Image (cartoon, helix red, strand yellow):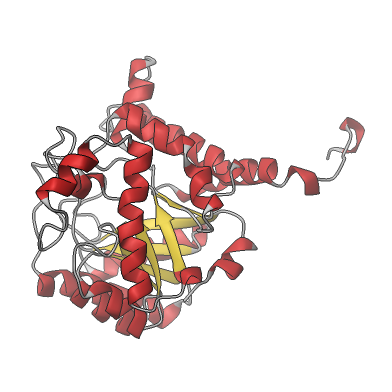
């Protein structure tokens, strides 16, 4: 378990992505065996990851992703978590919205449940987190809040049952994206409170890249401060998101991941957003390339902590 008090003294933490899926958009199929996943986990930790986020179901837009049965998802993530836990005390997050998967992962040694449905996808999830005294990441899921939006219909369905009535969906469809985020979070946080989950064990994720237009992604990145103002740490995932690629593509940069330059540019562009996030005090960034984002976070964190910086003059630099 991690809490807000502990997070506040850590700077911006790097959460390394470890997808043990055959179909994730970026690295699907690379780490489907326990040995391959363990090797990647070791690499991420050695490079500086303080958290590993392990996922057994792809959330990429269709076509290419599909619902994974509960037992199959458990079979993907639990052996990897157990293998990592045998040799490391690194914080482990399980990326799932299914309560049975979360329970199995927590019992195997995971510390955090990263729920992209914000406790709305499975009515039993909050109780599982509370029972295990785990920490949780609650994500604003625009796909669930606006299922009929053109940016949402390309995604798979999240959650077992619809959680908003048609009347609620009609009202929410008219809300500015910043207001919609808090309409969603209010529902998620009410469920967490009812389950007895302490506020200081909750992080909020603004859901960048899920069912949003490019403009909406950018607007939510401008709204990060409102999450802090309400007293919650931020868990941010912008690594290799399509809107980031689109921005640098429009600026004339190579973005084809099949080319060495294009692959590098995706991560380099993503790392710039990590630097901006760290300069605003974001607590956790979920990333693919640890070394690039480690450097970016150190620069952003220096800006955030400017008042504490030494007044080193030019002659004193090493």
The number of numbered discs placed on residues in the rendered structure image is 0
159 sits to left or right of 11: left
225 sits to left or right of 11: left
29 sits to left or right of 264: left
Quadrant the C terminus occupies: top right
* Residue 250 on image: x %, y %: 34, 16
For image coordinates 46% across by 75% down, the residue present is: 198
Query: Looking at the picture, does residue 125 appear above or below residue 45?
Result: below
* Residue 295 on image: x %, y %: 58, 44
For image coordinates 53% across by 44% down, the residue present is: 225
* Residue 123 on image: x %, y %: 19, 71
Figure quadrant of residue 40: bottom left
Figure quadrant of residue 17: bottom left
Q: Nearer the viewer, residue 95 or 16?
A: 95
Query: Looking at the picture, does residue 144 appear above or below residue 189?
Result: above
For image coordinates 16% across by 74% down, the residue present is: 75
Q: In the rendered image, is residue 167 in sight?
A: yes
Query: Looking at the picture, does residue 185 appear above or below residue 64?
Result: below
Figure quadrant of residue 102: bottom left
Q: Nearer the viewer, residue 313 or 114?
A: 114
Q: Nearer the viewer, residue 303 or 289?
A: 303
* Residue 69 on image: x %, y %: 8, 68
Q: In the rendered image, is residue 139 in sight?
A: no
For image coordinates 25% across by 76% down, the residue present is: 78
């Amino acid at each position: 378990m991690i809490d807000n008090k502990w997070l506040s003294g850590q700077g911006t933490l790097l959460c390394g992505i470890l997808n043990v899926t055959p179909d994730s958009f970026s690295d699907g199929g690379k780490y489907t065996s326990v040995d391959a996943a363990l090797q990647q986990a070791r690499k991420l930790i050695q490079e500086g990851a303080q958290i590993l986020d392990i996922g057994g179901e792809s959330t990429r837009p269709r076509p290419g992703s599909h619902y994974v049965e509960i037992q199959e998802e458990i079979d993907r993530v639990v052996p990897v978590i157990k293998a990592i836990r045998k040799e490391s005390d690194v914080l482990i997050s399980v990326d799932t919205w299914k309560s049975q998967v979360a329970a199995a992962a927590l019992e195997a040694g995971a510390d955090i449940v990263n729920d992209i449905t914000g406790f709305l996808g499975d009515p039993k999830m909050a109780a599982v987190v509370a029972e295990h005294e785990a920490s949780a990441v609650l994500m604003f899921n625009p796909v669930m809040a606006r299922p009929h939006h053109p940016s949402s219909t390309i995604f798979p369905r999240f959650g077992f049952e619809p959680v908003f009535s048609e009347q609620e969906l009609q009202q929410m469809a008219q809300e500015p994206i910043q207001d919609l985020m808090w309409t969603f979070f209010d529902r998620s946080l009410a469920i967490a409170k009812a389950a007895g989950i302490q506020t200081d064990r909750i992080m909020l994720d603004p859901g960048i890249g899920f069912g949003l237009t490019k403009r909406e992604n950018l607007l939510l990145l401008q709204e990060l401060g409102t999450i802090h103002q309400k007293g919650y740490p931020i868990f941010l995932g912008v690594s290799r998101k399509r809107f980031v690629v689109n921005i640098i593509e429009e600026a004339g940069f190579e973005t084809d991941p099949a080319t060495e330059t294009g692959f590098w540019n995706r991560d380099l562009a993503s790392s710039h957003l990590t630097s901006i996030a760290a300069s605003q005090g974001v607590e956790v960034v979920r990333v693919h390339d640890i070394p690039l984002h480690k450097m970016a976070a150190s620069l952003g964190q220096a800006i955030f902590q400017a008042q504490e910086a030494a007044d080193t003059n030019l002659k004193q630099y090493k």
